[in-house]
Amino acid sequence: MSRITLSRFLIEQQRSANLLPAELRFLIETVARACKAISHAVNKGALAGVLGEAGTGNIQGEAQKKLDVIANDVLLEANEWGGSLAGMASEEMDLPYAIPGQYPKGAYLLLFDPLDGSSNIDVNISVGTIFSVLRCPDGVTEPTEADFLQPGSRQVAAGYTLYGPQTMLVLTVGNGVNGFTLDRETGSFVLTHPGMQVPAETREFAINMSNQRHWEAPVQRYIGELLAGATGPRGKDYNMRCVGAMAAEVHRILVRGGVFLYPKDGAERPGKLRLLYEANPMAFLVEQAGGAATDGRERILDIVPTELHQRVAVCLGAREEVDVVTRYHAA
Ligand SMILES: O=P(O)(O)OC[C@H]1O[C@](O)(COP(=O)(O)O)[C@@H](O)[C@@H]1O
Ligand SMILES: [Mg+2]
Ligand SMILES: [Mg+2]
């Protein structure tokens, strides 16, 4: 069987499905190249002196790891020549980055979480990069924050790269979800997981149980019913898995099913995960794979953002489970 590389796959999408303008294809290939470089840094770990704290903080008051900063720089550098892009926004940058005037300007905006699950990095557990692509509004050459505040339903591409036992890039351009494994010998991402699908039903959930005291009543009720197992209202036993990196949780769901929740955890915080570069791209992927994604009340992709680093509650994965959680919030 001939191997389909990411480049070949993207060219096919451009030609046959007519889904992919050349500019968007270049952009995705550039992001994939940057992720390869991040993967090398992650793999080297202590050998390259990349573990530990950077000694700085981001806009959200979180201490940055060295790899948060390295991954952000790699993505910026790979993309800052412009070409396909008019601007970028990142978890690790307070403000959006407009492509400087001397470079050609493209039609797209790129948003990313350069290193997701960064508390895992020093203990050699999976981390990822999450990205989302929007169209730059017509006539805008110097995008500002307002230009990035588009609902997730307007994404033209989204994906993540998971740096685990294998490095995998999982992508949607609005035509299903496909997974590519990095072949280190050839340096190519190769299509290994075509047409990924989230089964409608599951017996597995992921949530950080240590926040239980902060959850609202509908989430307490839902998780209580799962924990009650076969003798409870759901009539089956559930298993729990929680990696502490959203990219890994979503990957598990895309491969073998499940549901992941990061609910509202206290009056002062609507959730932990960021809407524009975590929840939206993952919601797009999960929906494209036949699953569902809500904040407990509404579809994540319909939320109109008001801030670049806005947080949101997340419930995504198996449609049946997400429907139950969303119904309990409405009750
Ligand atoms: O440790 P907690 O509170 O459960 O948080 C875990 C969540 O936080 C995150 O690590 C946030 O991502 P960052 O590492 O990019 O800040 C998610 O990937 C993960 O689901
Ligand atoms: Mg993250
Ligand atoms: Mg991050």
Image (spheres, grey):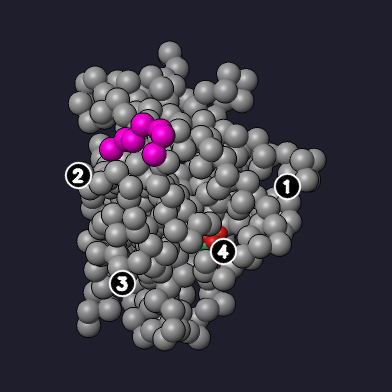
Q: Earlier in the sequence, mark 1 or mark 3?
A: 1
Q: Which mark is residue 50?
A: 1
Is-magenta flag for residue 104?
yes
Please name whichever residue, 198 or 4, is drawn nearer the observer in this view of the structure: 4
Q: Residue furthest top?
A: 2
Disc assigned to residue 138:
2
Q: Earlier in the sequence, mark 1 or mark 2?
A: 1
Q: Which residues are magenta?
A: 101-107
Q: Residues within 10 Å of mark 4 (few under 14, many from 20)?
A: some
Q: In the rendering, at what x and y percent does residue 190 appear?
A: 47, 25
Residue named by callout 3: 296
Q: Residue at x 61, y 65 (%)?
A: 57
Please give the count of numbered marks on the rendered protein: 4
Disc number for residue 301: none
Q: Is mark 1 within 8 Å of ligand 3?
A: no
Q: Quadrant of residue 46?
A: top right
Q: CA distance from mark 3 to mark 2?
A: 33 Å
From this view, report whether residue 140 is shown above or below residue 188: below
The answer to whether the residue labelled 1 contacts the one labelled 3, judged by CB atoms less than 8 Å apart, is: no
Which residue is the extreme one toward the front? 102
Give the distance between the C-alpha atoms of the residues marked 4 and 1, in whole angstroms: 18 Å
Question: Toward the viewer: 129 or 126?
Answer: 129
Tell us which disc is closer to us: 4 or 3: 4
Q: Which of marks 3 and 4 precedes in the sequence?
A: 4
- Tag 4 secondary structure: loop
Give x and y (percent) for residue 103.
40, 33
User: Mark 3 Cα within 10 Å, few/some/many (few <14, many 20+)?
Assistant: many
